[in-house]
Each structure stands twice: as structure tokens, then as C-alpha cells.
Image (tube, grey):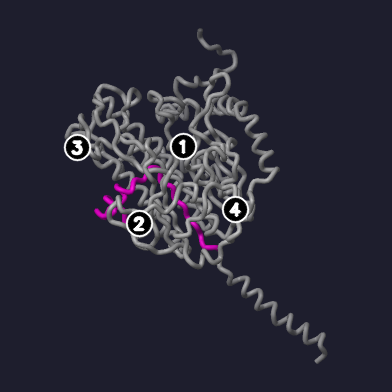
Amino acid sequence: MSPRKLLLLALFLLIPAAAACSRSSPPPRKLIVLGVDGLEWKLVLKFAQAGKLPNLSALLQNGVSGKLETLSPTESPAIWTTIATGKKPGKHGVLDFAYRDEDGEAHLFTSVHRNSKALWNLLGDAHRGCDVLGWWCTFPVEKIDGVMVSQTCMRTQIDISDGHKIWKGSYLRGIPGQVQPPDFEPRVRAAADRIYAASKESMRALAQPNLPLTPLASGLWDGLVSSFVADQLYADVARDLLKSGKASEVVLLYLGTTDVASHRFWRYLEPELYDHPPRASELADFGRVIEASYVFADGVLGDLRALVPDADFVVLSDHGFHAVNLHNPFPDAAPATEGPFVSGHHQDAPPGFFVASGPGFRRGTCASDADRVPVVGRVEDVLPTLLWRLGIPFGEDMDGRPMRDVLGEATLAAAPQTPVKSHEDAAWQKQRAEARAHAAEDEKRFEQAALRALDGAERQRLGNLGYVGEGLPLPKGDGEKDEK
């Protein structure tokens, strides 16, 4: 047989083998990152040892865990943006919940104020997918290779409750720019309607208070609704994507109820610490609210683990928590919108929670005492660590560095050891500068157009959740004028 015929025969034989290899190549192992705001190590261990958190317990037993040192001040938008970018606020640009312009007018920090690429942008640069659900400062949504459902806030939420910043955002029906791709929005809207309609019943998972409540207790309890409804929606979308097989390689999911419950109900968790503890009847009503919020987050984790049992999982928080305002009288007649009503806080930057489990991570041991839990890194180290897990180099301009003691040996061996100078090029910086230049103008246009689009039922719903208030009057129709 001639050499040419031999070559053709060899190529003919190799084609099926190559096709078979292509067909047999497994998809990338998924990476699920569950951000649970305000998880406190002391409570995680307490509830886990009582058998209340089986899924977190499994990760702690089979993975690597530790304390995550955080930023000060502990402002949620700034920290969660640091977690997503590997940079501190001075670099990534999201400094707080809100800022004031030169005229003293308040504005929210939004996604356009972020100077740095987040994990979802870096994965997009590599033509890899990422789903982002409920993360802080993701409104308006960006065009990414994946699904993004933003956590949307409005300016009516600024400076409420005697300066206690703002509360968590949510999906707000009828407002554009919250879902990417846009054709996924009907799915989100339908789920939001279903979850909100059942919110009174679903809140029973947190507590079943006996009515009537005092003004203080009523305000504390009502303040949980918007956060819990939002968490249920974002978790529902995550489950749906994973169940349908449409989830991206990386899924980021944020839950905030644990933080809201800890701010409002710590006095009911540790009443012995306070000069004015709740009455026995109130302890019976609300003594397990914080525990129930942890159990809810653990249940979401369990659902995700059941859908993708072979995935790598990371669960983390932005800070811890502890009791505050120990000497405050907490008068029953005072609504939870006046004075220092919070009984739990994190102003002194207690460390956050971190656990990673799966084939891409080491397997270590977990201390049984929160005081003996070691520090594994800082919030700015999370993104570089995730990048190495994904085989992507981190940037020299990032403030964080990979947490080597967290990653498995095979992951470390495959990780790109040489960082790039920066992932942000001139085109990115130009695009961000243009977006920021129009931020305030776009904000006002969004508020006017979006609020006009809301029907009466939706306005009532937003009012019930606290989104439409005196701070930002609803737009007048044509011909209407403000009363002087």
C-alpha cells in the first residue's frame, strides 16, 4: 500500500476515535458559591451540633473551613463587591450603600459604579458561564454569559430608621433592568408572584407569633418579609436552573435573611445579656427566628447539593454577628423604625464564615469551639482563590491572593502560578467611566418611568414591603402638581 493510502487510512481510523473522545469529554465540574449574609461561627457550630444544619455539617466534616477576616466598616455592598472582585472598596469603587452628590442629594451605589471586573465578567472573558442571583450591587444587570437576577434597591430605602442605612433589595415587578437575559424575566416574574402570594404562610417557617403584636415586635417581624421573599425567589431560580440542566458552570447565590434576623432578633436569642429582655410570651414567639433563618439557608444548600452532588461548594459570609445595645430599653410602644431598635450588629468587623468542600478543595478538620476556628483568609482573597479553582490567573492589581491552604493538591498543580498585570483593559475602563457619567441621570429616569409603570396592586405590594415611602414621592401623572 502506498504511503499516501496508509496516511488516508490512518486518518480514517482516527476520526471515530477523536469523535468518541469529544463525546465522552465531561462538562466542567460545577462550582456553587452560596453567600449567606452575617453567618456567625458561634451560631453555626451551636446549631450544627444540635443537628439543625445537616448540610453545612456535611461540608464542615468533608471540606476545609475557617474564619474570613473582613473589612471595616462592614457595609454589605462594599464587602460583597470585594468578594466578587478581589479588590478593596477604594479600587472597586462601591464604598457604601449610598453617596451624596455635590448638591447633597443621596444616590445608591449600583453596578455601574463598580470599576473592577467581577467573577462573572472574568468568566465571560474566558467564554465560560456564570449565573448570579441576588448579589449586592448587580442592578442594573449586565450582559453576561449566564443568568443574572439583580438585588434591586430604591432610593426610598436610604437613611431610614434613624440612619440605619437601607434594608435588603429584592426583585421588583414591573421595573426593567433586573433580569439577564431579558427573555428569562417572565420565569422570574411568575415565581415572584407565586412566592409573594404565599409569603404569609411561608413566614411560618421562621416563626408563628401570636397576635396582636406590640408596635416594636410588629415592626421587627414585618421587616423580615421582604428579605425572606427575595431569598426564596433567588433560591427558586437557582434550583430551577440546576434542575433543568441550564445552569452555568459557576452559580453565585446570595441569601440575606440571616443578617436581617440577626439585627432584629438577637435580643430574643440571648435575652440574658440585655437589661430589658423580651417577655416570656415574646420569647416563645421569636426565640427561634435566627435559628430558623440558619435552618432555611441550610435547606437551600441541601437542595443544591441534591441537584449537583459532585459539584464543588463554597459557603461564606461577609462578617459575623454579636449582641449590641445591651442597655437599651426597647419600649414596646416604639415602632421598629425609631431609635436603636437593633439588638445584633457587626460594627467592629467580627470575622465571617467560610467552608469549601468538593474535589477541588482540601479536606481538613473543623474545630468544635468557635474560639479555636482558624483564620483561612480575608474577604479579598475569595476571588483569587475561586479563579485558581477555575484555572484562571488572578490579577497583580487585586488586593487578595489565593488561599493555598484551601485548595486541593490537583487544583494547585493546575493553577496558573503567574498572575496577569490586570484583567481590566482600556476598553473596560472607558465603558465604566461612561456608565458612571450618566448614573444619576439614569437613576432619575429609571425611577420616574418604572414607578409610573407599576399598577395599583404592585404599588400596594411595594408599600407593604417598605419600598415606596415618603422619601421618594410616586411620580405624578400628566397635569398633576405637587401641593405646596
Identify the disc placed on residue 170.
1
- Whether residue 325 is visible: yes
Residue type of the residue flagged with mark 2? Asn
Which residues lie in the magenta part? 28-54
Front label number (1 vs 3) = 3
Badge 2 element:
helix
Q: Residues within 10 Å of mark 2 (few under 14, many from 20)?
A: many
Residue type of the residue flagged with mark 1? Ser
Q: Earlier in the sequence, mark 3 or mark 2?
A: 2
| CA–CA distance in space, label 4 to label 3 | 48 Å
Residue 176 at what x, y percent from top left? 57, 35
Badge 1 element:
loop
Image quarter in which the N terminus is found: bottom right
Observer-nearest residue: 281 or 343? Answer: 343
Question: Label 4: which residue?
Answer: 123
Front label number (4 vs 3) = 3
Badge 3 element:
helix
Question: Label 2: which residue?
Answer: 55
